[in-house]
Amino acid sequence: MSEHFDVHGGARLTGEVEVVGAKNSVLKLMAAALLAEGTTTITNCPRILDVPLMADVLRSVGCHVEIDDDVVRITTPAELSHEASSGAMSKLRASVCVLGPLVGKLKKAVVALPGGDAIGSRPLDMHQNGLRKLGATSAIEHGCVVAQAEGLHGAQIWLDFPSVGATENILMAAVLAEGTTVIDNAAREPEIADIAAMLGEMGAKISGAGTSTLTVEGVAELKPTEHRVIGDRIVGATWAFAAAMTRGDVTVTGVDPHHLELVLEKLRLAGAEVTTYDGKGFRVRQPERPQSVDFVTLPYPGFATDLQPFAVALSSVSDGTSMITENVYEARFRFIEEMVRLGADARTDGHHAVVRGVEQLSSAPVWASDIRAGAGLVLAGLCADGITEVWDVFHIDRGYPHFVENLNRLGARIDRVGTSGPEGG
Ligand code: UD1
């Protein structure tokens, strides 16, 4: 039986909410555990569906994985398989992140092509080109990425675009390559810095993490470690937008406000009063109806494409007209069709959307197409009259731990209807 959320409109969110580890970090840290024989422990892990899916991917190559509340323990055996073909591969994008570690450690990998959110074309050319520069061959065969090398050597690699996934895969292969690798135009996301930090604790030699030039001195082997995942800036930003949209007052802990500087600045421009607590969290108070603001998505430190649905949702209830430009994933504007069902005055033209704010949205049945679009529809439902049904909520469960419980604790009224998901059981 499929599930949906009944979202009651008219809530004003107030109170405190804690954010746990980042989805887009933990899954890659789990893959990095493949690089060291023995038991790696990862703490502050979010309780989301993608973590057990990634555990299945690691089990498929021979690891033993235990998930104990917010702690994940991965034991990597001496004999690891180079074939990652678990059914879970097709369910999440991050599964492709086993490619770099397997090539680094075993010098060969057969990795089923990943799945994940339907947000537009997601090729792997930069991942493959990077591995080729390190000395591997790489091809797509029978639905798998196949890579093989006699030995890996350091190289100078320029990425066409600062791709998060390509940076991670090349980094995780390069740590065990012979010699020095320089990755230029590397992604600068905080999650990349988190992986580099964990690899450093494992014995890797990496400098420049968090900048666009990563330098890696290859080492012969890595040892297991214990690492705490950084707080999820995308989830933290979701609560910030929720506060602004509902004219609420929400304090968010467990996330570094430096990771959200541009987001919080945009909310200030929309009229929010924002207070930051160094390294710990922030508070967003929205006394009046938000003012319209323009948004442009770009790689970090630009405005994250993952937050674009929230920018659209906020604009749809703001005073004035906003222009939203999507530069990373073209299909993310599918979300706008669902917003129009809720009475948003929005239209798209190529990479741009124009949204004219309305006083109140109007409840309707709507369908989540990916994690962030799903969460954006729930926030929009809070600003609609009546009860908005949000369908296909399994997407939301992939990325947000205790989503409904957290919102209800902040004063929303949302009911999960249907079989119980990870929050219920
Ligand atoms: C990650 C995040 C995703 C986020 C995205 C951008 C995970 C699991 N997912 O996805 O939530 O929206 O970063 O911040 O961490 N590209 C190519 N060739 C490649 C690789 C990428 O053309 O080989 C393009 C993509 O089509 C896209 C852009 O580069 O247009 C950015 O992709 P990338 O940064 O790689 O995103 P992901 O790592 O897949």
Image (cartoon, grey):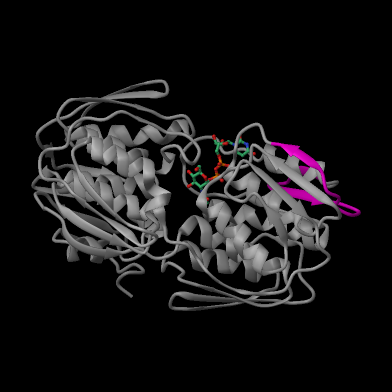
Q: Residue furthest top?
A: 349
Where's residue 96, x and y in %? 63, 52
User: Which of the 4 image quadrants contains residue 393?
Assistant: bottom left
Horizontal relation, residue 115 to residue 247: left or right: right
> Looking at the image, is 263 positioned above or below residue 330?
below
Give yes or no for residue 285 being in the magenta stretch.
no
Q: How many numbered circles are shown? A: 0
The magenta segment is: 137-158
Tell which of 268 and 314 is nearer to you.
268
> Looking at the image, is 117 positioned above or below residue 354?
below
Say whether residue 140 is visible.
Answer: no
User: Quadrant of the image for the C terminus?
Assistant: bottom left
Tell which of 208 and 379 is nearer to you.
208
Residue located 58% across and 43% down the image: 187
Where's residue 47, x and y in %? 41, 69
Residue located 42% across and 33% down the image: 297
